[in-house]
Image (tube, coloured by chain):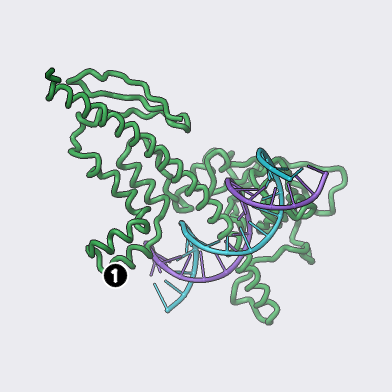
Chain colours: A green, B purple, C cyan
Amino acid sequence: MVSVAGAGTGRGSPAVTLVQLPSGQTVRVQGVIQTPQPSVIQSPQIQTVQVATIAETDESAESEGVIDSHKRREILSRRPSYRKILNELSSDVPGVPKIEEEKSEEERTPPNIATMAVPTSIYQTSTGQYIAIAQGGAIQISNPGSDGVQGLQALTMTDSGAPPPGATIVQYAAQSADGTQQFFVPGSQVLVQDEETELAPSHMAAATGDMPTYQIRAPATALPQGVVMAASPGSLHSPQQLAEEATRKRELRLMKNREAAKECRRRKKEYVKCLESRVAVLEVQNKKLIEELETLKDICSPKTD
DNA sequence: CGTCGGGTGCGTCAGACGGT
DNA sequence: ACCGTCTGACGCACCCGACG
């Protein structure tokens, strides 16, 4: 699980130990005695761990009477942000990767767009994705909430044999297909029909490799079923329109929350991995401390027969 | 082969939290 | 105060190995 390779353990020079973590990551661990920190227990790195384990230390805190009930309640009710905790960990431990801060849409869009061939139009979908249509007709989708690898998806335009009147089929390889997606393009609409969802009502994300079909339609008189045009509140009149607007808002909220939940789970997994790595590192440190303590004991109190 | 239990991922809801 | 985001909790579906 964790392999340790000693390197430069000579006295007087900083002892460096290479620790092979389960994830394959190699971490350099310095000899603790040479480091300025007086005690491992008082290491500032522990503070961030305490944030996540406060609930478990509730009993001891109560027995000590150090924290009054109000304060404790306030602390207990505060949920940890995996990003914050991990970033605090990262600032303490250089080897720990940071979770990238979410950038504002204005900030994170340009790098993706910059790699494109001067798009003539950039649109945002109802799922938060950005769609850029270049002058050559190429369509690229950038997913602001995803990794860089997934962030840019290339669409391929295909002229099938007999497309529906006024429709162009656009295909792209999606990393995950989560239900029907809709996005709106002024002058034309794009309807994503997730065949996986339609044919098999399974919600599992095993649709990797499936090819949802985009249909770009001209703003015809009748909208395709399932497509809801974004309407400004001022243009709503009838109760039916209000209900549709409420439904649309709810769908949008659910969609965003769905994505947020995915992202949260991803961060949580990353956070747990980080903690496991720290456990591995601290175990190695602890082992080395014990060994050094034994060595010092031998030096200070040689055996006398 | 059918069943059971554990593990995992997903969607949704509710509530806390932070920004405006 | 309002709104968007984040995250714990819950229920559900699916997968997989163990077991009879």
Which residue type carries mark 1? Answer: Ser
User: Compared to A195, does C18 lie above or below?
Assistant: above
Q: Please give left or right for residue B6 compared with residue A285 in the image.
A: right
Farthest residue, direction front: A305
Q: Please give left or right for residue A64 compared with residue A165 in the image.
A: left
User: Compared to A105, does A287 lie above or below?
Assistant: above
From the top left corner, tell me how far across and down residue A239 is, in percent. 68, 82
The residue to which callout 1 is attached is A69
Q: Residues within 10 Å of mark 1 (few under 14, many from 20)?
A: few
Q: Quadrant of the C terminus of chain A?
A: top left
Q: At 41% from the left edge and 50% from the top edge, which residue is drawn? A: A83
Q: At 38% from the left edge and 51% from the top edge, which residue is drawn? A: A84
Farthest residue, direction right: A162
- Which one is nearer the viewer's eye here, A216 or A44? A44
User: Compared to A99, does A281 lie above or below?
Assistant: above
From the top left corner, tell me how far across and down residue A38 is, in percent. 18, 38
Q: At 37% from the left edge and 56% from the top edge, which residue is drawn? A: A56
From the top left corner, tell me how far across and down residue A66 is, in percent. 22, 63
Question: Which chain is disc 1 placed on?
Answer: A
- Which one is nearer the viewer's eye here, A233 or A65? A65
- Which one is nearer the viewer's eye here, A217 or A295? A295
| Residue A287 appears anywhere in the view | yes
Q: Label 1's element? A: helix
From the top left corner, tell me how far across and down residue A186 is, in percent. 66, 59
- Which one is nearer the viewer's eye here, A23 or A287? A287
